[in-house]
Image (cartoon, rainbow, N blue to C red):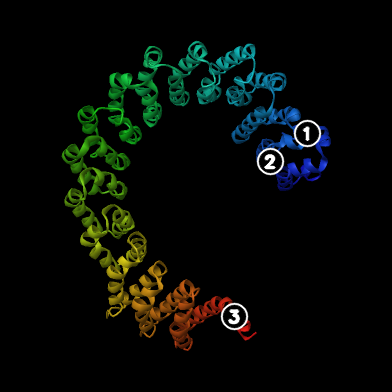
């Protein structure tokens, strides 16, 4: 309690975080009589302290003051927090009031919570009225019909408040409130509140009504939607503010699901095309993100006639973000159009986007090739798209090459083992000799991922011989890449392959004339020892082959080589200690 009164903000904050412990120490009665009144008087504090208090009171704090029958006492301090200026504190206080209300009985709600809600709704300062908007939905269905009538009138009043921030809060919480209303009251009250907010002169209010529109539409039948909401749908989609149109575009699929098939065919197709052709790139981007979802509710002929032409235009869009959004979604049209239409209409667009200047556009296409593959088959895919991918893999920009490398394992999963070996296998190995270190590093990680995709037997045939062969290369960089590749892929291989095919090459490179290679060999041997020493066979390989080389490197003329060799040996000793102890115990048992 002394820390709660401290002048030091950090001490008060720490005490608030431990307020449940304080309440536990005081006991339920003293917590009700002393702690709660003190907290209620503490709302004039730093924002971070108030935020912590609002959060703590919502964490089942009623358990520390005697249970749900006394939970209404928490509403006092939370009411004060709901009216402060800081938004985060108000939001957290409203959230905690909602949690407290959930454990109150109807009698407690009507005696304590509803008067609180009415005080907040009529508060002189707008902050309390903002908080009130969030509380109508959670309590509405838990009180008697006469009080429900009062709550509907109260929310209607907030929806026409003089302060834009309050109207914005009303628009934000209207959807949750409407879901608690009966259809009769949706039509008589909910619609009136929505229409007033949807026609607000502030676009920050109107944009929040898009989700309210969906919530109301979900409560009505398709004929009722057409009769009651058609005008508002048209107004939202064609709003003069791009922010409102952006919200409409972002939630278009939800709107289509809510209004029913008939209205989708009659009205929404035209509105969606309008959004895809919007003047603002942000709106076109949002609309492009809805393409496959919206197209699922349309017939194939309609998609070809109305949606595909828009997609074709968006592939040429001046905004790279629009093109990236289209590239991310266009593959979703393939299953809807079928093989022939995909080949005729979508494949040319895939090729165009694969050659886009913006890397994200190209990568979005590559990441969705599996969907296209399932529709048109691997042969057609390879004939049309793989040449473009290979061209990117040899791009003059190393960042483009690196980005393609990162997607190779995904392509491998989609294309299959034999096709991958034939088309992309040599390309993957060629990256190991790239002039740019980042590409060589990415290439070694790529080989590890491919091993995980295709298995160690595939790696033994396709990767290991080529990597080992590079260890004999006269160029220093190729030998260094061999060491790094072994270090990276060895943990994904088994002991047989490492001991039989890889280790000898690595041990030979331990005597390389270049110090950088020698100390990287020491680091690689440490990885091998760490990976395989846990089994008896692996431990034998470490002791007989790896440790002698590391011991020799401890006497190397280069300081770095000596350091990494000693480090690897130290690690080896730590790994071997449990095994040696186990062997000693076994030997003692035999001798007994």
| Residue 395 visible in the picture | no
Label annotation for residue 586: 3
Give residue 488's quadrant in the image.
bottom left
Quarter containing the N terminus: top right
Give residue 71's quadrant in the image.
top right
Query: Looking at the picture, does residue 481 appear above or below residue 49?
Result: below
Query: Looking at the picture, does residue 533 appear above or below residue 328?
Result: below
Quarter containing the C terminus: bottom right
Q: CA distance from mark 1 to mark 3?
A: 61 Å
Q: Position of residue 544 (x, y in %)?
A: 45, 85
CB under 8 Å between discs 3 and 2: no
Q: Position of residue 111 (x, y in %)?
A: 72, 19
Q: Which residue is labeled 2 in the image? A: 49
- Label 3 or label 2, whichever lies nearer to me, is 3
Q: Position of residue 400 (x, y in %)?
A: 29, 56
Label 2's element? helix
Label 2 Cα neighbours within 10 Å, binned few <14 / some 14-19 / many ≥20: many
Label 1 Cα neighbours within 10 Å, binned few <14 / some 14-19 / many ≥20: some
Label 3's element? helix
Label annotation for residue 66: 1
Q: CA distance from mark 2 to mark 1?
A: 25 Å
Label 1's element? loop
- Label 1 or label 3, whichever lies nearer to me, is 3
């Amino acid at each position: 309690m002394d820390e709660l009164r401290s002048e030091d903000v950090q001490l008060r904050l720490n005490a608030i975080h431990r307020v449940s412990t304080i309440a536990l120490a005081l006991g339920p009665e003293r917590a009700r009589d002393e702690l709660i009144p003190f907290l209620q008087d503490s709302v004039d504090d730093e924002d971070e302290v108030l935020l912590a208090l609002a959060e703590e009171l919502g964490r089942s704090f009623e358990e520390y003051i005697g249970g749900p029958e006394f939970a209404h006492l928490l509403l006092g301090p939370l009411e004060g927090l709901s009216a402060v200026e800081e938004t985060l504190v108000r939001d957290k206080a409203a959230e905690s009031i909602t949690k407290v209300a959930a454990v109150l009985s109807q009698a407690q709600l009507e005696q304590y919570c509803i008067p609180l809600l009415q005080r907040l709704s009529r508060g002189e300062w707008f902050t309390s009225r903002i908080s009130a908007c969030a509380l109508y939905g959670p309590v509405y269905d838990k009180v008697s019909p006469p009080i429900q009538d009062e709550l509907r009138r109260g929310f209607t009043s907030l929806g026409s408040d003089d302060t834009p921030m309050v109207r914005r809060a009303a628009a934000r919480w209207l959807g949750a409130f409407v879901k608690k209303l009966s259809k009769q009251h949706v039509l008589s009250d909910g619609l009136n509140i929505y229409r007033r907010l949807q026609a607000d002169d502030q676009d920050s209010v109107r944009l929040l009504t898009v989700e309210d529109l969906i919530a109301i539409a979900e409560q009505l039948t398709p004929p009722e939607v057409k009769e009651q909401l058609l005008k508002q749908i048209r107004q939202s989609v064609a709003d003069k503010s791009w922010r409102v149109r952006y919200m409409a575009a972002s939630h278009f699929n939800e709107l289509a699901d809510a209004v029913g098939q008939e209205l989708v065919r009659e009205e929404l197709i035209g509105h969606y095309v309008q959004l895809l052709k919007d003047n603002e790139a942000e709106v076109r981007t949002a609309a492009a993100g809805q393409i496959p979802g919206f197209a699922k509710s349309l017939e194939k002929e309609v998609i070809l006639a109305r949606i595909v032409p828009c997609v074709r235009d968006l592939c040429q869009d001046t905004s790279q973000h629009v093109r990236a959004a289209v590239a991310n979604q266009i593959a979703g049209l393939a299953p809807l159009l079928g093989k022939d239409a995909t080949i005729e209409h979508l494949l040319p667009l895939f090729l165009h986007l694969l050659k886009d200047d913006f890397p994200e556009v190209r990568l979005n296409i590559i990441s969705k090739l599996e969907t296209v593959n399932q529709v048109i088959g691997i042969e057609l895919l390879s004939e049309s798209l793989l040449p473009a991918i290979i061209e990117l893999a040899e791009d003059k920009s190393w960042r483009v090459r690196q980005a393609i490398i990162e997607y190779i394992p995904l392509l491998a999963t989609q294309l299959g083992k034999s096709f991958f070996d034939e088309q992309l296998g040599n390309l993957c190995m060629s990256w190991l000799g790239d002039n740019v270190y980042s590409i060589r590093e990415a290439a070694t990680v790529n080989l590890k991922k491919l091993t995980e995709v295709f298995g160690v037997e595939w790696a033994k045939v396709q990767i290991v011989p080529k990597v080992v062969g590079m260890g004999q290369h006269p160029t220093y960089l190729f030998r260094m890449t061999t060491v790094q590749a072994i270090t990276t892929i060895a943990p994904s291989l088994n002991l047989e392959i490492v001991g039989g095919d890889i280790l000898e090459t690595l041990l030979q490179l331990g005597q390389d004339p270049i110090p950088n290679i020698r100390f990287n060999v020491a680091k690689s041997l440490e990885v091998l020892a760490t990976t395989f020493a846990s089994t008896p066979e692996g431990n034998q390989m470490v002791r007989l082959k790896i440790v002698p080389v590391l011991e020799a490197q401890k006497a190397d003329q280069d300081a770095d080589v000596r350091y990494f060799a000693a480090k690897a040996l130290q690690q080896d000793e730590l790994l071997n200690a449990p095994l040696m102890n186990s062997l000693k115990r076994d030997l003692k048992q035999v001798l007994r």
